[in-house]
Amino acid sequence: MRVAITGISGSLGQALLSRLARDGADRIVGFSRVEQVRLELQAKYAWHPGVKIYGISLGLADTQRLTDAFSQCECVIHCAARKVVSGHYDEPREMHLTNVVGTLNVLVAARQAGVRKLLFISSDKAVHPCNVYGASKMLAEQLVISENARCFAQGLRCSVSRSVTVLALTGAGVGLGW
């Protein structure tokens, strides 16, 4: 299996990387904005010749770089997101750029790279959004689902999976007094 994972420095991204490497994935491409974690992951998985962790200082804005990295991947798991549930009222633009525009860029890159499957990791906060985070995840979900109408005939299947906010996840509970 050849897989790309956005948000590989988060709790879920790291768990997926560990599982895929252990199960013998041929190629695992990961993206992280967190330089320290990226370096740690590169060192930890140096034994696996198919693991390549990229830094994305510009976030998910560089569609061409995403397309190049997604080439030869069968599946993309899109975990990257701004996740501060109670925050971002003062900066909804950043939340929108990462969670909505970033998701759109991942979809475009996956289509251009000939990826067969895309899984978007959403949140339970998208069900009835009452904050910027939930609203951004809800909109991103709709982008992913609607992409099937455009790409199904080309062979790209897009799915959404909602996860619940857990305290151990990166960014979860920040600003809630925990």
Image (tube, grey):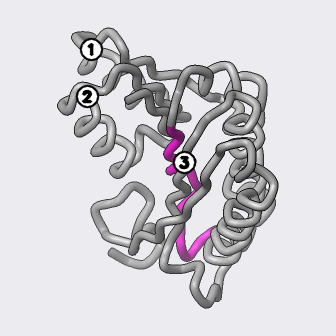
Residues under labels 2 and 1: Cα distance?
7 Å
Q: List x then y, in percent, for residue 71.
A: 62, 22
Determine which quarter of the picture holds residue 39.
Answer: top left
Q: Earlier in the sequence, mark 2 or mark 1?
A: 2
What residue sits 39% from the left and 55% below the top?
Answer: 170
- Residue 78 is labelled as 3
Residue 47 % position (x, y): 22, 11
- Residue 143 lies in what quarter of the image? bottom right
Q: Quadrant of residue 165?
A: bottom left
Please tell me whether mark 1 sits on a helix, a strand or a loop: loop
Farthest front residue in view: 153
The answer to whether mark 2 and mark 1 are in CB contact below 8 A is: yes
Classify residue 17 as left or right of residue 84.
Answer: left
**Residues drawn in magenta:** 75-87
Locate residue 66, reporting x and y percent.
67, 28
Asked whether residue 67 appears in the rendered view, the answer is yes
N-terminal-most mark, 1 or 3: 1
Q: What residue is pinned by disc 2?
A: 21
| Residue 171 among those drawn in magenta | no
Q: Which residue is mark 1?
A: 48
